[in-house]
Amino acid sequence: MKKTMLVIISMLSLTLALNAQKIKGSDTVLPLSQKEAESYMKANPSGRVTVTGGGSGVGISALVDGTADIAQSSRRIKFMEKHKIKESGKTLREVIVAYDALAIVIHPSNPISNMTREQLEDIFTGKITNWKQVGGSDLKIVAYSRETSSGTYEFFKKSVLKDKNYVTGIMSLPATGAIIQSIGQTKGAIGYVGVAYLNPSVKPVSVSYDAGKTFIAPTIENARNKTYPVVRPLYYYYTKSDAKIKKYIDFVLSPAGQKLVAEMGYVKAN
């Protein structure tokens, strides 16, 4: 009898897993999607949603090959990715679910509080290698970056580095949490993370995009009022004209879903 019950439970679990909507991709969007999915399933007990990370590129690849229903992305889909979806006969759909401010973070003991975009460019491209070159202590700079599959990696390259290449041999890490941990343990470290990930183990710096005339702190309020310059949209991509997918996305864009966006440290999409 017990064996039969275990078989039934296993079959039910498998059925639920197979019927679940699968969301995959950006680590930046991951905490938000997890919270949205949790709240959605509470409001819709028959709905099943699973959420995993891996990076924007990984999520979009999963959407292309059909192993994900929704790709969560912190960057716009690329031309070749769009082309692959079109070649498969599918119609791509894009929706902005939130906005995110990207914070530049350093070790809490670092006395630096303000940095210009040009200084950041020179650090991440390898021209500046010591903190004393930007008014800090005589300490080697250890720059951390996300991996190339990350939408955050690409956004930072475009917005801050102005499409210049990262320095050869930069410390690339697979997830935002790993960057937070590494910077918190390394006195000369610098990196970039979504504002929603900020915690006391790292120190965010104010950034200037006008050659040092004004420095703006990476806060939700500054992102919302558009004074902070390093802000990007966060996307959901999907291809199926599916009532379940639409219901979930409608929830995310609803007042309840957008309330969660604000509570999680992101900026509302609407």
Image (spheres, grey):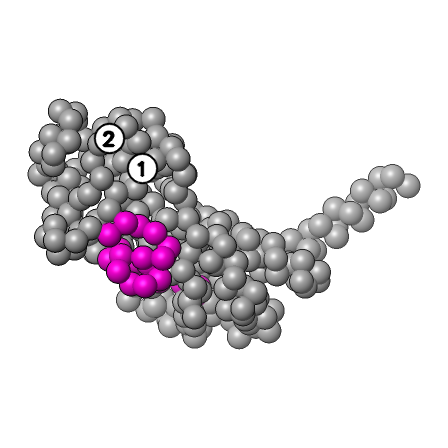
How many numbered callouts?
2
Looking at the image, which is closer to me, 173 or 31? Answer: 31
Residue type at numbered disc 2: Asn
Residue 123 screen position, x and y as percent: 15, 39
Q: Is residue 264 above or below residue 182?
A: below
| Residue on which the image places disc 2 | 110
Looking at the image, which is closer to me, 87 or 141? Answer: 141
Label 1, label 2: how far apart the Cα atoms are: 8 Å
Does 91 lie within the magenta span? Answer: no
What residue is drawn where x is 28% and y is 66%? 79
Sequence-wise, the earlier of marks 1 and 2 is 2
Q: Is residue 110 above or below residue 38?
A: above
| Residue on which the image places disc 1 | 203
Looking at the image, which is closer to me, 241 or 182? Answer: 182
Q: Which quarter of the figure is the C terminus placed in?
A: bottom left
Q: Which residues are magenta?
A: 216-237
Does 235 lie within the magenta span? Answer: yes
Residue 68 screen position, x and y as percent: 50, 58
Q: Is residue 183 toward the left or the right of residue 118 in the image?
A: right
Residue type at numbered disc 1: Lys
Q: Is residue 28 toward the left or the right of residue 147 in the image?
A: right
Q: Quadrant of residue 95?
A: bottom left
Q: Quadrant of residue 255?
A: bottom right
What residue is drawn where x is 28% and y is 28%? 109
Q: Residues within 10 Å of mark 1 (few under 14, many from 20)?
A: many
Q: Is residue 264 toward the left or the right of residue 108 in the image?
A: right
Q: Which quarter of the figure is the N terminus placed in?
A: top right
What residue is drawn where x is 67% and y is 62%? 43
User: Badges 1 and 2: C-beta atoms under 8 Å apart?
Assistant: yes
Residue 227 screen position, x and y as percent: 26, 60
Query: Does the rendering let one see residue 115?
Result: yes
